[in-house]
Image (cartoon, rainbow, N blue to C red):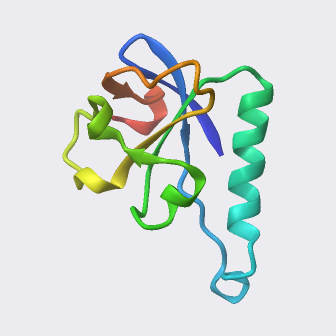
Amino acid sequence: MLTRCHIDRTPALCLGPCAVLPGYQRRGAGSAAIRAALAAAREKGEYFVVVLGHPTYYPRFGFTRASVHGIGLTIDVPDEALMALALDSGHPLPGGTVRYAAPFGI
């Protein structure tokens, strides 16, 4: 799931951490879902995606530690768990604070 968020005032998307039932894990379902979501975001003209998730899983899709780009949250999370991705190399990640949609309560 991709949800609108902002990095300060810059529009971005947040990727809901991907979960696959244990019996179906390690078959590529999660990777296929993430790749499809990122491709759809690119096709819609989006530039940036952030995810709060497992730090050894999301880098395979190009996500890097958000703090390296000056991106943070207003809540305490492990630094390595917040990651960001620029969908277009012509648009570098902006620095700032991630603001999630109101229903997230963050």
The answer to which of 66 and 74 lies nearer the viewer is: 66
Q: Residue 48 location, x and y as percent? A: 54, 28
Name the image quarter holding residue 32. bottom right
Q: Residue furthest bottom?
A: 23
Query: Which residue lies at the image location 78% right of the left edge and 36% below the top edge?
Result: 40
90 in relation to 42, above or below: above
Query: Which residue lies at the image location 62% right of the left edge and 32% below the top edge?
Result: 87
Q: How many marks?
A: 0
Q: Residue furthest top?
A: 9
The answer to which of 70 and 25 lies nearer the viewer is: 70
Query: Which residue lies at the image location 46% right of the left edge and 14% below the top edge?
Result: 10
5 relative position to 43: left or right: left
1 in relation to 90, above or below: below
Q: Residue 27 location, x and y as percent? A: 75, 80
78 relative position to 20: left or right: left
Q: Residue 20 location, x and y as percent? A: 65, 73
8 relative position to 61: left or right: left
Q: In which quarter of the image is the C terminus?
A: top left
Q: Which residue lies furthest to the front in this view?
A: 90
Q: Residue 43 location, x and y as percent? A: 80, 28
Query: Which residue lies at the image location 44% right of the left edge and 27% below the top edge?
Result: 102
46 in relation to 69, above or below: above
Name the image quarter holding residue 53. bottom left
